[in-house]
Image: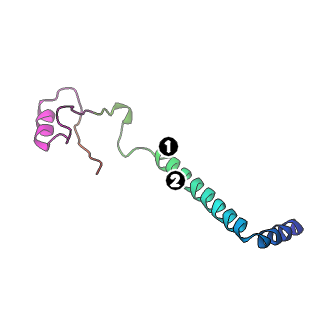
Amino acid sequence: MLQDVRYAVRMLALRPAAAAATVVLLATAIAASVVTFCLADAILWHPVPFRDPERVVNVHTRSNPIGISSSVLDAWAARDQVLSAVYSWSIR
């Protein structure tokens, strides 16, 4: 195996552009693997930060594209007889 490694190093030394492309390609592949694992770790293998995730529902309105105000959310929560809790969240 040592002989194969020496041969590979000599061939890459003869073609510096190919060596640079090889290094960039290898770095890109490693980075893609790390990103994929991190996403799978965060999304698939860790539980969600609340209990009973199968009971979570998403409610949104089409009349207000900006979102639901806190006063409207409080009014919904006060009148609600079905949901066990009402929370809001935002992606910004």
From the image, state whether disc 1 or disc 2 is nearer to you: 2
| Secondary-structure class at tag 2 | helix
Picture coordinates of residue 57 (x, y %)? 31, 32
Which residue is disc 1 drawn over? 44
Q: Quadrant of residue 4?
A: bottom right
Q: Quadrant of residue 88?
A: top left
Tell me which segment is drawn in magenta.
59-84
Label 1: how many Cα within 10 Å (few below 14, some 14–19, many 20+): few
Tell me, yes or no, whether the highlighted magenta stretch contains residue 70. yes
| Secondary-structure class at tag 1 | helix
Relative to residue 55, is residue 88 depicted above or below?
below
Q: Residue at x 44, y 44 (%)?
A: 47
**Earlier residue among tags 1 and 2:** 2
Q: Could you tell me which quadrant the N terminus lies in?
A: bottom right
Q: Residue at x 53, y 54 (%)?
A: 35
Label drawn at residue 35 = none
Which residue is disc 2 drawn over? 38
Relative to residue 39, is residue 84 depicted above or below?
above
Q: CA distance from mark 1 to mark 2?
A: 10 Å
Furthest toward the top, the residue is 82
Horizontal relation, residue 6 to residue 58: left or right:
right
The amino acid pointed to by label 1 is Leu
